[in-house]
Image (cartoon, helix red, strand yellow):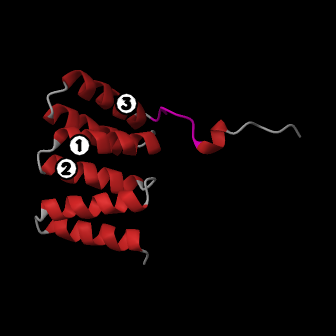
Amino acid sequence: MDERERLFDDANGELAIGELESAVSLYQQCVTLDPLFVDGWHALGMALMKTGKYPEAIEAGLRATALQPNDQMLWTSLSLAYVRNGQIKEAESAGTKAKILSWGGKLAPTPTESKPQTPS
């Protein structure tokens, strides 16, 4: 198990027993070690939301959706953070993106779709 995985597991454990500030700190360490760790950004956002730090939760949610724009759960979580922060217009926009994804749509091409095709 690498350091990022250990930190993530420890953070999940802290979250499970209600040690929210400790969980936030550990999740922050995860994304510092690996800024491309989508699950770390998502978990950090959710933990921040539980502590009432809505602007920070939104920032983490935006990082997660930027890394994985076609993930319905990430947009749904971001929408919730916006609602909690009183940003209804932004919440509705994120919620709409989640709905598009739930219907099988895409917000961004997948990596294989965005590569140019080579002629045969």
Alpha carbons under labels 2 and 1: distance apart: 7 Å
Nearer to me, 100 or 92: 92
Residue 18 on image: x %, y % = 10, 64
- For label 3, the crowd category at 10 Å Cα-Cα, with few meaning under 14, some 14 to 19 and many 20 or more, is many
- Dot 2 falls on a residue whose secondary structure is helix
Amino acid type, callout 2: Leu
The tally of labels here is 3
- 69 lies left or right of 28: right
Alpha carbons under labels 1 and 3: distance apart: 21 Å
In which quadrant of the rendered view does residue 68 lie? top left
Find disc 3 in the rendering and name its residue: 97
Taking 35 as reference, is 16 above or below it?
below
- 18 lies left or right of 79: left
The span shown in magenta is 104-110
Taking 12 as reference, is 88 above or below it?
above
Find disc 1 in the rendering and name its residue: 56
Amino acid type, callout 3: Lys
Tell me what residue is drawn at x 34 percent, y 51 percent: 41
Tell me, for residue 48, which label it has, or none: 2
Which mark's residue is nearer the viewer, 2 or 3? 2
- For label 2, the crowd category at 10 Å Cα-Cα, with few meaning under 14, some 14 to 19 and many 20 or more, is many
Tell me what residue is drawn at x 74 percent, y 36 percent: 116
- 68 lies left or right of 19: right
Disc 2 + disc 1, Cβ < 8 Å: yes
